[in-house]
Image (tube, coloured by chain):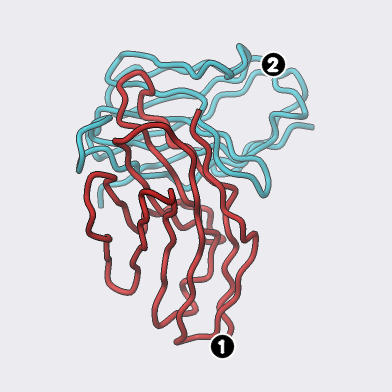
Chain colours: A cyan, B red
Amino acid sequence: DAMVIQNPRYQVTQFGKPVTLSCSQTLNHNVMYWYQQKSSQAPKLLFHYYDKDFNNEADTPDNFQSRRPNTSFCFLDIRSPGLGDAAMYLCATSRDRRRSGTDTQYFGPGTRLTVL
Amino acid sequence: AQTVTQSQPEMSVQEAETVTLSCTYDTSESDYYLFWYKQPPSRQMILVIRQEAYKQQNATENRFSVNFQKAAKSFSLKISDSQLGDAAMYFCAYRSDRETSGSRLTFGEGTQLTVNP
Protein backbone atom coordinates (compact mmCIF):
# COMPACT_ATOMS: atom_id res chain seq x y z
CA ASP A 1 0.00 0.00 0.00
CA ALA A 2 1.19 3.51 -0.78
CA MET A 3 2.01 5.31 2.40
CA VAL A 4 4.04 7.77 4.43
CA ILE A 5 6.64 6.11 6.63
CA GLN A 6 8.51 7.65 9.52
CA ASN A 7 11.55 6.20 11.24
CA PRO A 8 12.14 5.75 14.02
CA ARG A 9 8.77 5.89 15.78
CA TYR A 10 10.50 6.80 19.04
CA GLN A 11 13.79 8.67 19.33
CA VAL A 12 15.68 9.57 22.47
CA THR A 13 18.51 12.05 22.33
CA GLN A 14 20.58 14.04 24.75
CA PHE A 15 20.43 17.77 25.25
CA GLY A 16 22.54 19.37 22.53
CA LYS A 17 23.22 16.15 20.61
CA PRO A 18 22.23 16.41 16.92
CA VAL A 19 19.43 14.14 15.81
CA THR A 20 17.90 13.28 12.43
CA LEU A 21 14.37 12.08 11.81
CA SER A 22 13.44 10.33 8.60
CA CYS A 23 10.37 10.34 6.39
CA SER A 24 9.76 8.39 3.21
CA GLN A 25 6.78 8.13 0.91
CA THR A 26 5.62 5.74 -1.76
CA LEU A 27 2.91 8.09 -3.03
CA ASN A 28 5.25 9.90 -5.45
CA HIS A 29 3.92 13.20 -4.14
CA ASN A 30 5.59 16.49 -5.01
CA VAL A 31 5.23 18.10 -1.60
CA MET A 32 6.58 16.96 1.75
CA TYR A 33 5.93 18.71 5.07
CA TRP A 34 7.28 18.59 8.59
CA TYR A 35 5.04 19.49 11.54
CA GLN A 36 5.86 19.71 15.22
CA GLN A 37 3.14 18.66 17.65
CA LYS A 38 3.66 19.19 21.36
CA SER A 39 1.55 17.36 23.87
CA SER A 40 -2.15 18.28 23.72
CA GLN A 41 -1.50 20.95 21.11
CA ALA A 42 -2.26 21.39 17.44
CA PRO A 43 0.41 20.50 14.88
CA LYS A 44 2.53 23.41 13.76
CA LEU A 45 4.16 23.54 10.33
CA LEU A 46 7.94 23.88 10.41
CA PHE A 47 8.68 23.82 6.68
CA HIS A 48 7.85 22.08 3.45
CA TYR A 49 9.47 21.08 0.18
CA TYR A 50 7.77 21.55 -3.17
CA ASP A 51 9.94 19.25 -5.26
CA LYS A 52 13.40 20.59 -4.39
CA ASP A 53 12.16 24.04 -3.44
CA PHE A 54 12.52 24.51 0.32
CA ASN A 55 9.94 26.70 2.09
CA ASN A 56 10.65 27.66 5.68
CA GLU A 57 8.01 29.05 8.02
CA ALA A 58 8.96 32.45 9.37
CA ASP A 59 8.91 31.36 13.01
CA THR A 60 10.77 28.07 12.61
CA PRO A 61 13.94 28.20 14.73
CA ASP A 62 17.29 27.98 12.96
CA ASN A 63 17.96 24.89 15.04
CA PHE A 64 15.69 22.99 12.66
CA GLN A 65 16.90 22.10 9.18
CA SER A 66 15.62 19.80 6.47
CA ARG A 67 16.95 17.88 3.50
CA ARG A 68 15.20 16.25 0.60
CA PRO A 69 17.71 14.23 -1.42
CA ASN A 70 15.08 12.76 -3.74
CA THR A 71 11.32 12.60 -4.23
CA SER A 72 10.82 9.78 -1.76
CA PHE A 73 12.83 10.91 1.24
CA CYS A 74 12.86 13.92 3.50
CA PHE A 75 14.87 14.43 6.68
CA LEU A 76 14.44 16.68 9.69
CA ASP A 77 17.70 17.65 11.38
CA ILE A 78 17.73 19.20 14.84
CA ARG A 79 21.20 20.58 15.31
CA SER A 80 21.20 21.12 19.07
CA PRO A 81 18.03 19.75 20.66
CA GLY A 82 16.76 21.50 23.73
CA LEU A 83 14.25 20.27 26.28
CA GLY A 84 11.62 22.39 24.55
CA ASP A 85 12.06 20.43 21.34
CA ALA A 86 10.59 17.28 22.84
CA ALA A 87 7.49 16.64 20.77
CA MET A 88 5.86 14.45 18.16
CA TYR A 89 7.18 15.24 14.68
CA LEU A 90 4.75 14.54 11.87
CA CYS A 91 5.65 14.17 8.22
CA ALA A 92 3.00 14.70 5.58
CA THR A 93 2.83 14.67 1.80
CA SER A 94 0.54 16.03 -0.87
CA ARG A 95 0.49 15.62 -4.61
CA ASP A 96 0.43 19.37 -5.16
CA ARG A 97 0.10 22.50 -3.12
CA ARG A 98 -2.92 24.40 -4.19
CA ARG A 99 -4.99 22.84 -6.89
CA SER A 100 -8.17 21.49 -5.43
CA GLY A 101 -8.21 17.74 -5.23
CA THR A 102 -4.44 17.39 -5.17
CA ASP A 103 -3.62 19.32 -2.04
CA THR A 104 -4.86 16.83 0.53
CA GLN A 105 -2.11 16.12 3.02
CA TYR A 106 -1.44 12.53 4.04
CA PHE A 107 0.31 12.08 7.35
CA GLY A 108 2.80 9.54 8.62
CA PRO A 109 2.50 7.98 12.08
CA GLY A 110 4.97 10.45 13.60
CA THR A 111 8.23 10.21 15.54
CA ARG A 112 8.10 10.96 19.23
CA LEU A 113 11.29 12.73 20.27
CA THR A 114 12.46 12.71 23.87
CA VAL A 115 15.29 14.99 24.95
CA LEU A 116 17.16 14.02 28.10
CA ALA B 1 -3.19 35.76 9.87
CA GLN B 2 -5.82 33.10 9.95
CA THR B 3 -6.90 31.48 13.18
CA VAL B 4 -8.96 28.40 13.84
CA THR B 5 -10.88 27.92 17.08
CA GLN B 6 -12.38 24.75 18.46
CA SER B 7 -14.25 25.75 21.58
CA GLN B 8 -14.92 22.22 22.84
CA PRO B 9 -11.76 20.61 24.25
CA GLU B 10 -13.71 17.43 25.02
CA MET B 11 -16.94 15.86 23.85
CA SER B 12 -18.61 12.55 24.52
CA VAL B 13 -21.34 10.64 22.73
CA GLN B 14 -23.16 7.38 23.18
CA GLU B 15 -22.53 4.71 20.60
CA ALA B 16 -25.01 4.93 17.69
CA GLU B 17 -25.94 8.52 18.50
CA THR B 18 -25.04 11.75 16.75
CA VAL B 19 -22.51 14.33 17.84
CA THR B 20 -21.51 17.70 16.41
CA LEU B 21 -18.06 19.21 16.82
CA SER B 22 -17.72 22.96 16.45
CA CYS B 23 -15.11 24.97 14.57
CA THR B 24 -14.89 28.64 13.78
CA TYR B 25 -12.19 30.46 11.89
CA ASP B 26 -11.11 33.96 11.17
CA THR B 27 -9.95 35.07 7.73
CA SER B 28 -10.20 37.99 5.36
CA GLU B 29 -9.85 35.74 2.32
CA SER B 30 -12.65 34.55 0.09
CA ASP B 31 -10.99 31.44 -1.33
CA TYR B 32 -9.78 28.76 1.04
CA TYR B 33 -10.22 25.15 2.06
CA LEU B 34 -11.36 23.62 5.31
CA PHE B 35 -10.62 20.17 6.65
CA TRP B 36 -11.44 17.90 9.51
CA TYR B 37 -8.68 15.49 10.53
CA LYS B 38 -8.93 12.64 13.01
CA GLN B 39 -6.02 11.59 15.19
CA PRO B 40 -6.65 8.34 17.10
CA PRO B 41 -4.41 7.20 19.94
CA SER B 42 -2.01 5.64 17.41
CA ARG B 43 -1.32 9.27 16.44
CA GLN B 44 -1.62 8.93 12.66
CA MET B 45 -3.57 11.91 11.37
CA ILE B 46 -6.30 10.85 8.97
CA LEU B 47 -8.35 13.12 6.71
CA VAL B 48 -12.06 12.88 7.50
CA ILE B 49 -13.59 15.44 5.19
CA ARG B 50 -12.74 18.58 3.21
CA GLN B 51 -14.73 21.58 2.02
CA GLU B 52 -13.92 24.13 -0.66
CA ALA B 53 -15.07 27.60 0.37
CA TYR B 54 -16.46 28.34 -3.09
CA LYS B 55 -18.86 25.41 -2.86
CA GLN B 56 -22.16 26.10 -1.18
CA GLN B 57 -23.04 22.44 -0.84
CA ASN B 58 -21.94 20.87 2.41
CA ALA B 59 -19.46 18.00 2.05
CA THR B 60 -20.49 14.51 3.12
CA GLU B 61 -18.47 11.33 3.57
CA ASN B 62 -20.59 8.40 4.73
CA ARG B 63 -21.45 9.07 8.40
CA PHE B 64 -19.54 12.34 8.44
CA SER B 65 -20.97 15.62 7.23
CA VAL B 66 -20.23 19.27 7.70
CA ASN B 67 -22.30 22.37 8.19
CA PHE B 68 -20.36 25.09 6.42
CA GLN B 69 -21.59 28.61 7.09
CA LYS B 70 -19.25 30.92 5.17
CA ALA B 71 -20.72 34.20 6.36
CA ALA B 72 -20.53 33.07 9.97
CA LYS B 73 -17.08 31.49 9.39
CA SER B 74 -18.29 28.30 10.96
CA PHE B 75 -17.42 24.74 9.94
CA SER B 76 -18.93 22.10 12.21
CA LEU B 77 -18.57 18.32 11.84
CA LYS B 78 -21.48 15.99 12.42
CA ILE B 79 -20.84 12.34 13.12
CA SER B 80 -23.93 10.17 12.76
CA ASP B 81 -24.36 6.67 14.18
CA SER B 82 -21.20 7.07 16.28
CA GLN B 83 -18.95 4.03 16.55
CA LEU B 84 -16.32 3.11 19.11
CA GLY B 85 -13.68 3.55 16.42
CA ASP B 86 -14.63 7.20 16.08
CA ALA B 87 -13.00 7.96 19.42
CA ALA B 88 -10.07 10.27 18.67
CA MET B 89 -8.82 13.81 18.72
CA TYR B 90 -10.46 15.79 15.94
CA PHE B 91 -8.71 18.77 14.41
CA CYS B 92 -10.29 21.42 12.25
CA ALA B 93 -7.86 22.96 9.75
CA TYR B 94 -7.75 25.87 7.32
CA ARG B 95 -5.69 26.27 4.18
CA SER B 96 -5.43 29.50 2.26
CA ASP B 97 -5.61 29.53 -1.51
CA ARG B 98 -3.04 32.30 -1.73
CA GLU B 99 0.25 31.33 -3.33
CA THR B 100 2.24 33.26 -0.74
CA SER B 101 0.87 31.11 2.06
CA GLY B 102 2.36 27.99 0.56
CA SER B 103 0.57 24.91 1.71
CA ARG B 104 0.27 25.71 5.38
CA LEU B 105 -2.52 24.03 7.28
CA THR B 106 -3.59 26.07 10.28
CA PHE B 107 -5.05 23.76 12.88
CA GLY B 108 -7.42 24.37 15.74
CA GLU B 109 -6.55 23.12 19.21
CA GLY B 110 -8.54 19.93 18.77
CA THR B 111 -11.57 18.27 20.33
CA GLN B 112 -11.12 14.96 22.14
CA LEU B 113 -14.11 12.77 21.33
CA THR B 114 -15.05 9.89 23.60
CA VAL B 115 -17.56 7.29 22.43
CA ASN B 116 -19.34 5.48 25.25
CA PRO B 117 -20.63 1.92 24.67
Q: Is residue A30 left or right of residue A69?
A: left
Instruction: Give x and y (percent) for residue A45.
Output: 50, 30
Quadrant of the drawing holding the C terminus of chain A = top right
Same chain under badges 2 and 1? The reply is no
- Vertical order, B43 against A106 (above or below): below
Q: Residues within 10 Å of mark 2 (few under 14, many from 20)?
A: some
Q: Amino acid at mark 1?
A: Pro
Q: Residue at x 63, y 37 (%)?
A: A11
In the rendered image, which quarter is residue B36 located in? bottom left
- Vertical order, A48 against A87 (above or below): above
Specify the subunit that label 2 lies on.
A
- Report the front residue among A86 and B11: B11
Q: Residues within 10 Å of mark 1 (few under 14, many from 20)?
A: few
In the rendered image, which quarter is residue A97 located in? top left
Q: Amino acid at mark 2?
A: Ser
Q: Secondary structure at mark 1?
A: loop
Specify the subunit that label 1 lies on.
B
- Report the front residue among A115 and A91: A91
| Numbered badge on residue B117 | 1
Residue beneath label 2, please?
A80
Q: Residue at x 40, y 24 (%)?
A: A48
| Numbered badge on residue B47 | none
Q: Secondary structure at mark 2?
A: loop
